[in-house]
Image (cartoon, rainbow, N blue to C red):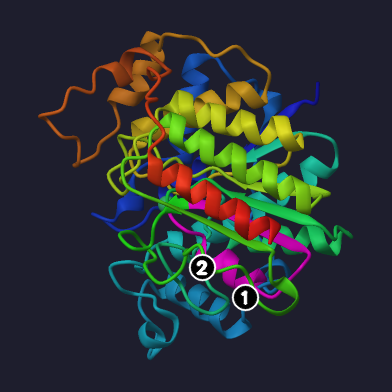
Amino acid sequence: MREAKLVGSLKYRNLRYTKNHPLRIPRVSLLLEFLDAMGLIEEEEKVEGRPATMEELLLFHDRDYIETLIEADRCQCVPKGARERFNIGNYENPVSPAMFRGSSLATGSSIQAAELFLEGYIAFNPAGGMHHAFKSRANGFCFINDPVITIEFLRRRGFKRILYIDLDAHHCDGVQEAYYDNDQVYVLSLHQSPEYAFPFKRGFLEERGEGKGKGYNLNVPLPKGVNDSEFLFVLEKSLTYIKDVFEPEVYVLQLGTDPLLEDPLSKFELSNAGFLEAFRLVRDLFGDGVYLGGGGYHPIALARAWTLLWCEMSGRKAPEKINPEGRKVLEEVEWEEFDEDIDISYMFEDLKDPWRGGEVREEIRDLVGRLKALIYS
Ligand SMILES: [Zn+2]
């Protein structure tokens, strides 16, 4: 079996979003601390992330946008005109050390994950997957689009058929736009329907690409309350159909954990056991790929889910119980949004959630029928 590497850094602790922002929570540093406490990672499996170079950032973004991010991060202020022009310095995309230093570190780390993958390792960059950022505009908490830069890196290494799979609860509008007229990159996204969720304007079934890229974009907009059975049903069908029409040489998988029931920013109801099965489904069909993180706004749910995925990637049997050291790490997380009325003690005791399956609703079966008709038309 291939050896696994986790590209991460404790530097993210000091590169946080502003107070009260959903991404203010500890994520990568918490995952690393939790894995250590649980004895689920060896030192030689850790790779320290590095920032992206200017050349790498310009694989997708405009220079004046990047230079503005650098300046805003340096002065911790909004340069004149930048709010309107680049959509930064507002509640959604605030000025903070995350806006350039954090995003650049996450992007360099995604390229490292791709490099490690090409060297024969299984590689996961949990800080990656910032799929909303546009070429010269911040969007949806994202400043630098590391999935696109990673795909561009792979294209420059000669890959001509790349599949991008996005399991985040939100549509990957930044990635879709980058490849909308491209037939070398197939973009698949399962997400909450834009009828009720961010980004509202993009992510509809009818968006299939344009020009040369027509037919190389597949959106799967889903209703509220999607359970494990429904998510896996629709994912399995979508991947199987795509495999019939597009044979990828490599794929990039975005593993945002916001489809989980506990997540405060989504209406899906997956368990981490279902999320793990979704990961296995992708891997069973396409082998290993380049693994990136993504959204995820409940720190404890996120740490548990990515721990399960890491165990799977690195060939470990995931323990059933959280040990006292691991529990201590989780209990020390400061987060103002813990809801006192809901009993979440299970999250501190067991690593895996009980299965949250159920019936596959008729509207989801109908959607799969429409997907099939679109793919084979
Ligand atoms: Zn999301």
Rendered-image quadrant of the C terminus: bottom right
Q: Which residue is drawn at 47% across and 42% down?
A: 365
Instruction: Name the residue beneath numbered marker 2.
Output: 133
- Of all residues, the one furthest to the left in this rendering is 341
- Of all residues, the one furthest to the right in this rendering is 158
Instruction: Name the residue beneath numbered marker 1.
Output: 61
Sort mark 1 into few (<14), some (14-19) or many (20+) by Cα contacts within 10 Å. Answer: many
Residue 217, numbered label: none
Q: Which amino acid does label 1 sit on?
A: His
Q: Tell me the quarter of the picture where residue 136 sits.
A: bottom right
Q: Position of residue 118 (x, y in %)?
A: 84, 44
Q: Is residue 79 above or below residue 148?
A: below
Q: What residue type is labelled 2?
A: Ala
Which residue is at the front of the view, 193 or 275?
Answer: 193
Q: In this view, does 42 lie above or below 162?
A: above
Part of the protein shown in magenta = 170-190
Q: Position of residue 175 (x, y in %)?
A: 59, 64
